[in-house]
Image (cartoon, rainbow, N blue to C red):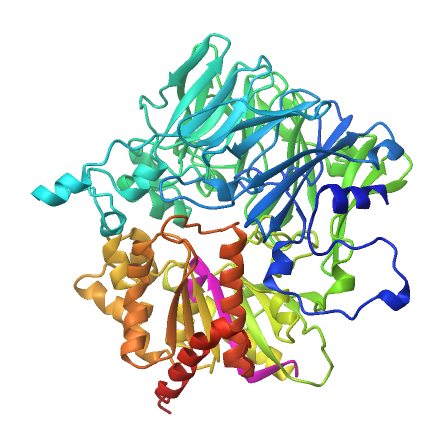
Amino acid sequence: MVARRLLLAAALTSSLAAPLRTSAAAVSPKRQLTPADAVATVRVIRNELLSGQAAGDGFTSPDGLRYLIRLVYGDVKRNGVWMDLLTGPLNSLESAAHPKLCAHLFTTGLGSTTSARASQADVDTTNVIRWFDNTQVAFLWSDARATRQIMSVDLITCKHQFLTHAPADILSFAHAPDGTLLFNARVRPPTSHAEQMWAHGFTVSDASDAISILAGYIGEEARLVTVYKNSWFIRSPDGLRRLDLDGKRHDPTNPYSRDVSVGPGGRYAVVWIGAATMPKDWDRYLNPELKAGLTNTAKVRLPVRYAVVDLRAASSRMLWNSPLSLRGQVHWSPKDDTVLLAPTYLPVDAQNPVGLSGNAAAEIDVRTGQYRVLPVDLTDRRLLIAHWLSPGEIEIASTNNSGEDLITQQFIRVSDSWQLLPVAKAPKPSQTLGLPIRLETRQSLNTPPQIFAVDARTGQSRLVLDTNPHLLDKFKLGRVERMSGVLPTGQHWIAQLIYPADYRPGEKYPLVIQATYGPGFGAEEFSLEGSWGYNGMGLGPTDVPAYPGQLLATRNIAVLELQVLRAGQGIRQAEDHQLVYEALSRQLVESGLADENKIALTGFSNNGYWVEYTLAHSGFPFAAAIAADNYDPSYLQSALGNWREMDEVLNGGPAFGVGLEQWLMHAPGFNAEHIHTPLLMTCQDGGLGMIIGKWETYSRLRHLNRPAQMYLMPAVDKHPAHTPQNPEQIIAIQEIAIDWFEFWLTGKEDASPRKREQYARWHRLSASHAVPNP
């Protein structure tokens, strides 16, 4: 009870706050959930590596005697986001059940046109907590200039301070036991000479692309290279030193995907970096996505290699001749000179099929690059645990992509190789991990998270925190259940169905299918957006506002979040998604839940392409659709981006000569005449480049009098964000999504005077809509 008062009074969470005890007569009827309500809910930030592997909801100090919980919730009035740090001791259930509010931090949650990781990343799960010792932590946070710095918090005194005052955003960091910091920071772009170049004329650089020029980058480097460019630094008691990696002062690859890990002894670190050139033998790797990314090194945007940093000598070298896996993690041995990589690629000279596909596990000596392969295959497996039990023993636990079929394996090093221990000797992960008192998050698809302290010895538990105690009492929400299956044509799918809040068996309802992707089913998690695959962002400011989830269910529209597993390669990817969307639509119609004439699609990012492709090639009468901030391998967007290799893969060949015939058949832009579904196209990132990139499909639809609309979120020119966290931006995107689906699926309109012109326009779109050919 004290924990609840702490959260509601001290943390000032949201409109969900209410007296803890009310009489039955005072309970008011449940009401509809609004975007403002959803933004103000509270979520727990997980500590999650960029590889997607979570470190748990409650963060425990190295000695296991203290915990730290980070809470995030939107503040609509101030148009920003709060992060609260709660802490407490873990020496007993009683002491753990009384958390202390230690920091109350505010951020705008706004993106930036000049940095890849701006204020919207302050409250991201990948803003990893680093424990300096058992009472002091550090993480990234924006200062008064909206520049991200390293902030530390003392969990005893609750004093917080910035450890750095860098002129540009710090993107990632790690620390050694002696206090040495290893970090990379964005390189501030040189003074722009664009105005002079426009005045006097200039020759377009061979490195330029049209999207960069539209964004104002007309010099030697493309926009992404300029925004991504970062440098590495070591700050020790001897001062601040710049560190060259791979012989380069700058790394131009995407810092969204950047993990930094320092060994327990503080001598060595392993970091993710780019590569100046790709080794010739890397074309033998079997993973199609890796092969596509390595085709042209000038266009590689993701870090592709591991580098070893000697913090004492301020020197670096490559770990080994192998690309990194974005699914992989670095696990340090207690000896501080070797690491376990899992899953990982192996050097091509190993001639290991599992290693060539990026599904191996290996121990590597960071001093020499010599390695030993573990006898394990992580193909189609999701890593849960990989850690050292001792310098000669390793435990790995994994599930299949649906979160089932748990396998725990232990390995022992015998002489110069690793051997698998018999199954009978391999305990479950919980027997080798865990502390006497630990934090545990309990939730389900239909129950919001609660955090408990659990005594591992007795099994007793105490409530530490009820994050949203009145959410289910105040709002009408739909029941959620999981589904999965395989089509007769072989496509595997998994889904979460959110029933209408007032669902009655036998009635038919409108249905919105949210096209998504992720790691597959894991533990059941409560989510307002209906998502299981977006980093535990199901409460608080959502990073996928195009997916309304419960915001539609509360209005009696069913929602199906659908993920296609094992989709084919190339053109088959889009075709498989189309087949599953159509099949699941028919299945839910036949079940009696969905009205065949009121089924809609929504897709964010790459999923927006699957939606556009489906609309352009399907005969199913989808009633409405949204394609949000999405990639589109149509002709114009590809031309603006200098003919991306993935566009050729998805369209069946290059956009020239004979290959163009494949584009004419498959690219959504060339098939806009087949789209009759009302389509809302939203822009959140990329500025003019995103608008122009979507213009081919949009302009064709408008020319054909099809009901299409393009919407730009607030401040997209100055504060773009592919995954926004600013309340005003989130609410605006969610409101227009709700309005769009209600208008086309139910005929309902928001009575707000400020939306009169919006509905007048939509009525004009409906009236001018050309009738589909039979």
Q: Nearer the viewer, residue 539 or 637?
A: 539
All told, the count of numbered labels is 0
Instruction: Estimate the x, y position of residue 46 in percent, counting from the top left.
Output: 64, 41
In the rendered image, residue 333 lying in the magenta stretch gets the answer: no
Left or right: 426 with respect to 673?
Answer: right
Residue 697 drawn above or below residue 131: below
Where, quadrant-wise, is the N terminus in this rendering? top right
Hey, which quadrant is residue 383 in on the image?
A: top right
Q: Nearer the viewer, residue 361 or 194?
A: 194
Residue 664 drawn above or below residue 341: below
Where, quadrant-wise, is the C terminus in this rendering? bottom left
For the record, the magenta segment spans: 592-610
Residue at horizontal 43%, vertical 10%?
313
Instruction: Estimate the x, y position of residue 766 in percent, counting from the top left.
Output: 41, 84
Left or right: 647 with respect to 462?
Answer: left
Residue at horizontal 11%, vertical 44%?
199
Residue 241 drawn above or below residue 143: above
Instruction: Estimate the x, y position of residue 613 in percent, counting from the top left.
Output: 39, 69
Q: Residue furthest front?
A: 753
Left or right: 238 with respect to 526?
Answer: left
Q: Residue furthest bottom?
A: 774
Q: Is residue 326 visible?
A: no
Residue at horizontal 64%, vertical 42%?
45
In the rendered image, residue 596 lying in the magenta stretch gets the answer: yes
Q: Nearer the viewer, residue 652 or 721?
A: 721
Q: Residue furthest top?
A: 238
Q: Residue furthest left?
A: 200
Instruction: Estimate the x, y position of residue 123 in percent, counting from the top left.
Output: 57, 42
Q: Is residue 218 visible?
A: yes
